[in-house]
Amino acid sequence: MKSRIITLITDFGTADTYAGVMKGVILSINAIAMVVDITHEIAPQDVWGACFALHTAYPWFPKKTIHLVVVDPGVGSERRPLLIETKNYFFIGPDNGVFSAVLAGQGKKSVYKITDSAFLLPEVSATFHGRDVFAPIAAHLAKGIPPSRMGTVVSDYVRLDWPQPMAVKAGTVEGQILHIDRFGNLITNFSRPYVRELTGGSDFYVRYAGKSINQVVPSYAYAKPGQLCSVFGSSNFLEIAVAGGSAAALLKARRGDPVMLLKK
Amino acid sequence: MKSRIITLITDFGTADTYAGVMKGVILSINAIAMVVDITHEIAPQDVWGACFALHTAYPWFPKKTIHLVVVDPGVGSERRPLLIETKNYFFIGPDNGVFSAVLAGQGKKSVYKITDSAFLLPEVSATFHGRDVFAPIAAHLAKGIPPSRMGTVVSDYVRLDWPQPMAVKAGTVEGQILHIDRFGNLITNFSRPYVRELTGGSDFYVRYAGKSINQVVPSYAYAKPGQLCSVFGSSNFLEIAVAGGSAAALLKARRGDPVMLLKK
Amino acid sequence: MKSRIITLITDFGTADTYAGVMKGVILSINAIAMVVDITHEIAPQDVWGACFALHTAYPWFPKKTIHLVVVDPGVGSERRPLLIETKNYFFIGPDNGVFSAVLAGQGKKSVYKITDSAFLLPEVSATFHGRDVFAPIAAHLAKGIPPSRMGTVVSDYVRLDWPQPMAVKAGTVEGQILHIDRFGNLITNFSRPYVRELTGGSDFYVRYAGKSINQVVPSYAYAKPGQLCSVFGSSNFLEIAVAGGSAAALLKARRGDPVMLLKK
């Protein structure tokens, strides 16, 4: 079980050289690795943001891809470095909840605490485990070293709760904005299966920021320019959108804001 | 006619995982593809901006490179997915004018509407054809599938007019700012051959934002720091620049602003 | 002595296509080159910023890596294109001081002025030597062309002084902020060996922006959230940091600001 693809999700940005240094370390250990940037623009130390980004991206990669996530406010403390093996993928990063969505998924998972320093850089700093711990582990894994040689199985890893919609009264549930994307789309935690089950297929509308959003369209282009609408987006969550504009700007939206879903 | 290089021009930004997901899809279909980011920072839904970016970048890549452009405000509507084959390159993206500069070029071109769903993802969403349509087509094309197997030839594709300078009176033409780059250089639509023909090689100057810019220099370093000048830039368009500074900031310039070119 | 890895440090940003065009040129000359972005977010024409970025990144790459740096305010002028060979790496870019930290290092170095136009693009513009000069040289070097075939040895290259801390009175030295990173950490020019020698291992504190920063911690997580602290960071320079926050924002810091180090 071997892969040469290593993806990166970090909060390092692209102005500093931190992400580049990780690539250098990976290629120094494994010259045939293929490093794929998913994003380095997670907000600094935003563990939940990284968890959401990983959730939306990882299943689209080839089997055996190694997903490396370095959003690590606890670097240098007692928080443990993890290596997770699922049926189709590997995940490497700090034990701070960033893998919660992966760990909540179906199927057998083996979770290892990385313990063998033979697979780390010879000198491990207290401030940059992306370079000294996680990148080397990923590079060695991509060379075919089995996870069980790098660490020991643990079960008491950190899990964040994925925010779930809650019924507030008959016919009304409260969800929230999970993510705001570059287009200003507000991605809620109302998944398509959840809405289908809740409404039994009948009509619904959304209330947010004092507005009722009645129009559910298949895609942004079906609404008039400038019009608020809702759409089941590409990750199967209901989004609040403005055709040709930004719902986030129009509604001054913030991640975590409550959103109401109501049966018509 | 086969290539493993697939370039990306999108308006997805790099904070969301959309571009990363496209890379995952490409590599899932074609493990030896080499994905090269040109830019993901096209302004949201800015079809013209993507057209200009493509124009400046595509001829510098190896023959048979596949250029994938996903700036797609009409996603999910009736707008068609296109695959274009020219003498040297392939282009894949929505039929919204983004390929206008390519299609205006010399030489034989075959333009296909993508019709065969066998080369798309099994489930095609209404909101993310970059992932479900265009990335898979590119990946299959890079495996050697001929374009004619993926679609049917069309001739009624969308073409945007490239803005042309216009004579406004004897010795004066009006052009416009096509693009403002990171250095604050204002790239006009006065191409070097156009200016040569217009002026017959005699001197000229530029008027913009109430200022006459008399100095035409070979490169920015030939002007004094802080001085306005004009330069034929790397894409052979006349640029208004400030040595060691930003003409855009100094002149509060905006894309599309008119610029006058006058014979001395 | 051959490598296929070519890293890029530029001030081109990622919204324009300049960096993408360089990749196209490299791959056109050398189809098996692997281009690795370190950063394109050096501030426009910030030679010192590029010098610092290179210093922090280059030693982490495999031996024989070719590091290409294009921050080039003097493009098109008489400033020379350089190719530097050290024991472990190659460096290519303009002779403007960007390689000062490399050239100040130990070990034999050969510095070549690039003179042979056979290894450049056929037409060399005055404004984009990243595309027309530096990318082609890197691509040919990665094919195994020896540096001595591309140019002639020079010794009068530009060197910037790395800012050194200075004693201002007994027990007090003045340093400065070399860099502010994405997390708002203020990276000073007090290196770990320098501080060790200066203080003889005894305690010290830092003064900056009217504040005394007494707590030296092994990593950010050892300070209370919101608390100012100092840390020897991943490049072995002392940093001023705020746990879970931004020291730069809190202290309105700017690169180049003086910072005092005092023995307790």
Image (spheres, coloured by chain):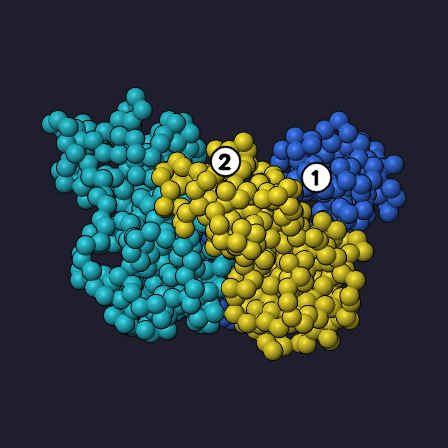
Chain colours: A blue, B yellow, C cyan
Residue A207, position in %: x, y?
77, 32
Let me know if marks 1 and 2 both belong to one chain.
no
* Residue for point 36% across, 58% down: C68
Cα distance between the residues tagged 1 and 2: 37 Å
Quadrant of residue A208 within the rendered picture: top right
Q: Residue furthest left?
A: C170
Above or below, comparing residue B55 to residue A98 in the picture: below
- To which chain does the residue with label 2 belong? B
- To which chain does the residue with label 1 belong? A
Q: Nearer the viewer, residue B216 or B177?
A: B216
Residue C235, position in %: x, y?
30, 47
Kind of element beneath mark 2: strand
Above or below, comparing residue B200 to residue C149 in the picture: above
Residue B255, position in %: x, y?
59, 41
Left or right for A54, reference B71: left
Left or right for C233, reference A166: left
The residue that label 1 is drawn on is A245
The residue that label 2 is drawn on is B212
On-image quarter of the C terminus of chain C: top left
Left or right for A115, reference A65: left
* Residue for point 56% across, 55% down: B197
On-image quarter of the N terminus of chain C: bottom left
| Residue C10 appears anywhere in the view | no
- Tell me the kind of residue under disc 2: Ser
Q: Nearer the viewer, residue B151 or B157?
A: B157
Left or right for C193, reference C39: left
Quadrant of residue A165 within the rendered picture: top right
* Residue for point 43% across, 71% down: C30
Above or below, comparing residue B183 to residue B144 in the picture: above
Residue B257, position in %: x, y?
61, 39
* Residue for point 63% across, 33% down: A254
- Tell me the kind of residue under disc 1: Gly
